[in-house]
Image (cartoon, helix red, strand yellow):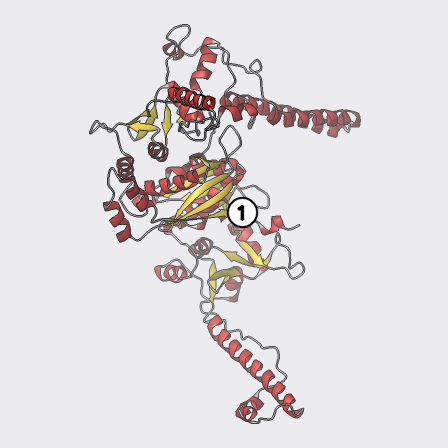
Amino acid sequence: MSDDHKHNNINISIINNQILIFEVDMICKLRESYGIIGVLSGTLSLAPQQQSLLGVPLQLSIYELLYLVDLGVCYLNVDVDVDVQGEEEFVNDLINNVKLKRIQRLKKLKNHGILQKNEELEDKDWVCNLNEHELFIETKNSTKQTNTKLLSMNDDIIQQLLSIKGHDFTMIRFQIYKDLKKKSWFIQPGLRYGGDFICYPNDPLRYHSQLIIKCCTWDDDDDDVNLIDLINFGRLGTSVKKSFVYGYVKHDGIVNYHTVEWSGFG
Amino acid sequence: MPPKGSSEHLQKYVQPLPVDIIQLPELIPHNPLSWVIVIYSFLQQSMKMKKSPIEVRYENMTFKVDTLPEMKYLWDHGFFGKGILSRSEPTWLDRTERRLLKTNGSLTSEEIVKERRRLREEFKTERKKLDDLERTFKLENNLNELQKLESKRHLLTEKRTLINKTKPTITEIESDKDMRLEDKELIISDTTIKRMEYLELMPVESLFLLLLNSIKIKNPETGSNYTSVQLFKKLATQCGSITPDNYFITQFLIYYHYKSLGWCVKSGMKFSSDFILYERGPPFQHAEFAITIVHDKQVKDFTYYGSINRVVGVVKKTMVLSFVQSPPLSVFQESWDALSDNKLETMFDLLKLYDIDEISYKRWSPSRTRE
């Protein structure tokens, strides 16, 4: 892979089951070229207490990641055991530091003649090896780049990506996501309106969202569309002036949509 | 209809349940006259009492009350049921008589709501006109006209606040002048109209009323009346398999729970909840709480409860999650098998196996709550 190619493609890190992007250039590119917004999740150092504006890293959903993989425009950095190794060392260092402090105190007491016994001190000779001035502990960066190749959609990759924990993935949602992208909607997570996705006609900074998408299966008895849910979604969509859309995939792979509305007559 | 919480309502809706009680004056044992008064008042009141429970028809899984006095009786005593052609109180006959026979009577809630909606729509078109005018004046930089506009706008907003506060009068209401084709079938004579509306009771309401002995329901198969336990068993079997998370049993449990705490419980279907709670009843105030049942074996994801909360939040109610802790299957099965048609306590033994806990749910957004 040439450096130039690498430069043009999107570098995605997966850290602690979160899909993150750190370069601002890439975030702009995602927005402009692919219509992917993601969620900014970092704190701004200049205004750490506010909530409305956030900084890098940009967090992507599993659907956004899979979509990019499907397009073949990204490569991944996957972390290996970053928390396990780091954590253990960190805890050990901490324990040693605490021991050191205690022994220093005992020494002091002995010097003043308050403490008579020597045994406790003699047991802890190993302490001398510790650097007494070390107060701040450096956590090591154990991230390593495992995959610098461009990803393409194949079963291995999908399995690998789906093993990322904490993402409630279903294939149907991804199919619907892809179909909506094909229809050039800008898509954001739909939690705040009780759906799976919310759709914007263009950049969310310029437009209000118009659709709330809920994905359901076409002929699965376990996933019936509940009548009371229909009332719920109809009312919800109407009260926030959006269309509530049920999306489902039929056997032939074609995605269909239905909207519900609360007309409130009577 | 008088405004919410008026004294007229307080006098009309005195009894919270369709149960007749006899109130006796004070008895003074050594005063023979007071004995006479007590006996007279007892006889007089017992004469007026309803002789027999109201007959409820059970067909196609719905509970129907057909006769007008009984419909009114159940509504006035605890707000039970729903008129199928009305919002809640069965008012279809009143409305249709006014429309077709031009009779007088007080306005029904449906008519008031309709009129208010019309006024609000009127307000919106007026506001739109003013907005358009404002734009043109601003482009012309016509300060004089803009000032005049501001006072007009002020008047309009005042009018808007009045819509919710005042009650429209009958003369204001524009009734539909034209007869519809199907209206001809309704008119029997100059003074009577065919009665189309019946009162529908929720299954949980029906069982509750049957427990109070206020209604009787005929079993078409046997020809005799249902006992409470029989009806309980029948409705539970109709709502899926007999397991601790049976839909009807859970619904009745929660209904009975809030009913015994003194709330007026109505269906919350309109707000995608299970029940809504009125402190006293629909004519007095808006419902304060919307109940969503969370069964320990059927907990759904966060998005589900979040979306219900969005709907409940819009209508300014508090969402309450009622957690139902169910017994293990073996214990439940034992109690279910022990149900005996004529022993009411066996039903309550079964219900006592459940635990109920409630939590109120509120949407809290950190960035909006900050100052």
* Most foreground residue, B206 or B262: B262
Mark 1 residue type:
Arg
| Mark 1 closeness class: few <14, some 14–19, many ≥20 residues within 10 Å | few
Q: Is residue A16 left or right of residue B188?
A: right
Res A219 → quadrant = top left
Can residue A197 be seen?
Answer: no
Q: Element at badge 1? A: loop
* Most foreground residue, B178 or A52: B178
Res B78 → quadrant = top left
Q: Position of residue A40 (x, y in %)?
A: 56, 55
Q: Residue at x 57, y 61 (%)?
A: A23
What residue occupies the far top of the structure in this picture? B190
The relative height of residue A27 versus residue B182 in the rendered view (above or below) is below
* Most foreground residue, A232 or B218: B218
Q: Is residue B103 left or right of residue B224?
A: right
Residue that badge 1 annotates: B363
The relative height of residue B184 versus residue A91 in the rendered view (above or below) is above
Q: Position of residue B359 (x, y in %)?
A: 48, 48
Q: Residue at x 33, y 28 (%)?
A: B215
